[in-house]
Amino acid sequence: MQKTELHNSILAKLNPAQSIIFNDAVEAYKEVVAAIESTPATTRNHYGSYLRFATSAIEVFTLLCAGANKQGVMDAARINGVAQ
């Protein structure tokens, strides 16, 4: 798994067990992200598709580490009240 700077900074704050869980979640979300990003966008940056996933800070970070469109995820997180 190729890790981004964000991914590495999150892992640095987790204990070994948490790191395994987070890495597994990122891998699982990669399929979701690929499916979302491969469809025509019906909302700007697919934020509408990310609404049901961007419901907590950890889910937002997991989506971003899985390669999701940053602006789409952040717009969904703002709508869900997770980000400002």
Image (tube, rainbow, N blue to C red):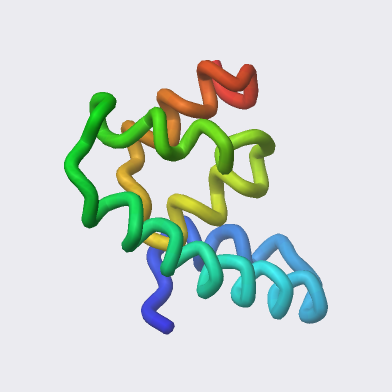
Along the line of sight, which residue is nearer the eye, 40 or 65?
Answer: 40
* Residue at the (47%, 27%) spot, across then down: 76
- For the point 55% across and 60% down, the residue is 9
- Which residue occupies 60% across, 59% down? 10
Which of the image's four quarters has the N terminus? bottom left
Q: Residue at x 52, y 17 (%)?
A: 79
Quarter of the rendering containing residue 34 = bottom left
Q: Quadrant of the C terminus?
A: top right
Q: Residue extending furthest bottom?
A: 1
In-front residue for pair 30/8: 30
List x then y, in percent, for residue 33: 39, 57
11 lies above or below 53? below
Quarter of the view holding residue 14? bottom right
Residue 50 vertical placement versus 26 (above, below) = above
- Residue 42: image x %, image y %? 24, 29
Q: Position of residue 12 (x, y in %)?
A: 64, 67
Total labels: the figure holds 0
> Going by the image, does 19 lie left or right of 70?
right
- Measuring from the top left, give residue 54's x and y in whole percent: 57, 37
Residue 81, quarter of the rendered image: top right
